Amino acid sequence: MKYGATFPLWRAAAGGHWPAYLRHAFVAGLADGTLPRPAYLRYLQQDYLFLIQFARAWALATTKAETLAEMRACAATVQALIGTEIQLHVQTCAAEGITEAELFTAEEALETIAYTRFVLDSGYSGDLLDLLAALAPCVLGYGEIGARLGAETSGAAYQDWINSYADGPYQDTCHAVGALIDGVVSRRLGPNPEASPRWPDLCARFATATRLESRFWQMGLTG
């Protein structure tokens, strides 16, 4: 999936880290149903905690925004996280006897801490563009994974998870985030962003977040 003009450039700059994230063994297990249920639930519990911090990062993005359109786009993403994505985790875990109170009070894995604090630090220490470079691998990577698995699978054991990222609402969010990134890049770096002295650092932030995504999958897979 393209999701705008900037995302493919960042994805290419990440090199082998990007396919390692998208084709991780955890993702393969989701696709063919071989992922052990305990691993899936461990991932969901940690992803619930991750998404709380991720929503805070998108809320921070609204304060870093320079235009009302940027604020609206960031706020809409916060709502999608809180209103839809987190709720999927709550419902799935509830069916397994895990309450939302238990999810909220669970201990964060070190991989969860490392990833979420990296993203938040990118926002606190930088501007909106720095923050978006750290946020993009999660939002747009899940969009790519969802679109691919949605086209390849039907009736899989984890089809509900796959559909939540393959279906229109999440894909709409990805296209909106891609457009937001393009607009922010254009306003801050001009028509030739790759010539900007900031470009290598933005690519490095994106690549680091991508590596942390792979570590997060591995945490779910092996604990």
Image (spheres, rainbow, N blue to C red):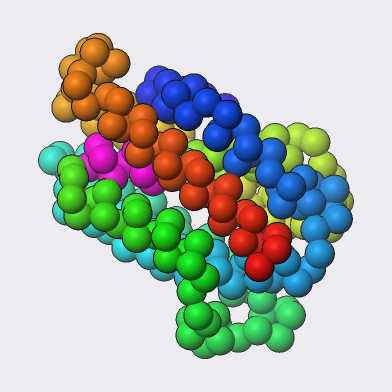
Magenta range: 128-135
- Estimate the x, y position of residue 188 in percent, counting from the top left: 16, 27
Residue 191 located left or right of residue 165: left
The answer, for residue 86, to whether it is visible in the render is: no
Q: Quadrant of residue 207 in the image?
A: top left
Residue 119 located left or right of residue 2: left
Residue drawn at x 56%, y 86% is 102
Placement of 128 over or under 164, stated as above or below: above
- Estimate the x, y position of residue 154 in percent, counting from the top left: 84, 45
Residue 142 belongs to magenta span:
no
Q: Assign the N terminus to one quadrant of the image.
A: top right
Placement of 91 over or under 14, stated as above or below: below
- Estimate the x, y position of residue 192 in percent, counting from the top left: 25, 12
Residue 217 located left or right of residue 130: right
Looking at the image, the residue that sits furthest to the left is 66
Instruction: State how many labels appear.
Output: 0
